[in-house]
Image: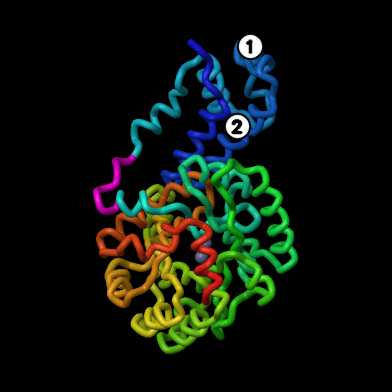
Amino acid sequence: MAPRDPVADLRRIAFLLERANEATYRVRAFRSAAATVATTPHEELTARAAAGTLAKLAGIGEVTARCVTESLAGEEPVYLRRLLSTEGTDLPGAAATLRSALRGDCHVHSDWSDGGSPIEEMALAAAEIGHEYFVLTDHSPRLTVAKGLTADRLRRQLDHVAALNEQLPAGFRILTGIEVDILEDGSLDQEDELLARLDVVVGSVHSRLRDDAARMTRRMVTAIANPHLDVLGHMTGRKIAAQGAGDAAHRTARTRPPSTFDLEKVLAACVAHDKAVEINSRPDRLDPPKRMLTVAVEAGCRFSIDTDAHAPGQLDWLGNGCERAALCGVPADRLINSWPAERLLEWTASH
Ligand SMILES: [Zn+2]
Ligand SMILES: [Zn+2]
C-alpha cells in the first residue's frame, strides 16, 4: 500500500477531537506529534517506524507513534477510523442553507490570548474548511485570566497578521480584530486609536454578570452606541452544560445563568446603530437562548454566527449556530458573515 501522509492524519485526528469538544490538552499530543513529524526526514521516520523507536522523538508518544506507523504503512490509523465512525450527521435543510451561505467567522482566538493554537494553524484549518476569512479576536487587557493583549502586544499581533496574510493560501485572509471587554461603565477595554485600526470589533461582557438589569442595560447600550463596536458577543454570558466537556459534575459546576437586562432596549440599540448580535456556537454557550434570538429576529437585527473557537477543530462549530438560527427564522441576508470580506469591511466602517 502507498504510504499516507502521517502529518495530515495526525492533524485530522486533532481537528476531530477539538470539534468533539475534547479538552485542548488532550488534543495537544496530536498537534505536537504532527509538528515533530513534519520536521523529521522521511527516511528517519520509516527507519524509526521499522525499529519501533518513533516514541523516542520529542513530542511523540505511544499512541501517536502507532498512528504514524500505520500511516507510513498506508493504513488509515485505527484512532482516526474510530473518530470518523462517530462523526455527526449532516445539518437539516434550513440550517444547511444558512451554513452554506457563510463565508467566514467573526470570533476566533489564538494562543496569543487563551486559545490553544498559533494563529497560522487556525488560519490553515479555516482555509481547509472553506472559509474566505476569519476575524482574529483575542481578548483585551483587563481579562488577565485569558492573557488579554495589552495595546503593545496587539500592535505586535497586527504586524504578525500582516506578514502571515502574505503567506496564506490564496482566497483566504485573516481580518484583524479583538474581543474587547465591555467595562462596567460601558466603555471598551482598549485604546481608541487601536480599535479604530481593527477590521472588526466584537464587544463582550465578561465581568459583574450578576449586576441588576438597569445597570447591565445601561452598560450594554453604551457599548453598542460606541462607533468602534461592530458585534455584540455572547449577549447573556450564560454557560450551559456542554457535551464532551469533561464529566457531568465538572460540566454542572461550570454552568452560569444568563445575565438580566432589558432585551428590547438592547436590541433596539443594535438596530439603531446598525450593530450585529452574535449567535455564539460554542456548545457551552449557545448564546443568545432561542427565545431571545426570536425576539431579535423580529426586532430587525443583523447577526453574526460565530464559533468563538479556541482550537482549529472548533472552527467547525458554525453548524450549531446555524441550526439555532434556522429554528428561530434568521434570514440569510441578515448574516454579516455571509458577506465577502470587502463588504463586511465597508459595513464596519459605516457606523
Ligand atoms: Zn467572550
Ligand atoms: Zn471569545
Counting from the top left corner in percent of width and height, residue 156 is at 74, 59
Alpha carbon of mark 2 to alpha carbon of mark 1: how far? 20 Å
Q: Is mark 1 within 8 Å of ligand 2?
A: no
Q: Which quadrant would residue 282 be assigned to in this image? A: bottom left
In the picture, measured across the screen, residue 123 lies left or right of residue 319, that is right
Name the residue at 69% across, 24% down.
40
Name the residue at 41% across, 70% down.
277
Which amino acid type corresponds to the residue marked 2 in the rendered image? Ala
In the picture, measured across the screen, residue 279 lies left or right of residue 206, that is left
Counting from the top left corner in percent of width and height, residue 183 is at 57, 79
Q: Are marks 2 and 1 in contact (CB under 8 Å)?
A: no
167 above or below 134?
Answer: above
Location of mark 2 (residue): 34
61 above or below 267?
Answer: above
Rendered image coloring scheme: rainbow
Q: SS at mark 2? A: helix
Residue 284 visible in image: no
Q: Between disc 2 and disc 1, whose residue precedes?
A: 2
Q: Compare residues 148 and 192 and report the one nearer the observer.
A: 192
Name the residue at 56% across, 85% down.
185
Q: Compare residues 3 and 177 and report the one nearer the observer.
A: 177
Which amino acid type corresponds to the residue marked 1 in the rendered image? Ala
Q: Main secondary structure of the magenta part?
A: loop
The numbered mark at residue 138 is none
In the picture, measured across the screen, residue 334 lies left or right of residue 146, that is left
Counting from the top left corner in percent of width and height, residue 77 is at 47, 23
Q: Compare residues 312 and 243 and report the one nearer the observer.
A: 312
Which dot, 2 or 1, sits closer to the camera?
2
Residue 156 within the segment the image draws in magenta: no
The magenta-colored residue range is: 88-95
Q: Which quadrant would residue 141 be assigned to in this image? A: bottom right
Location of mark 1 (residue): 51
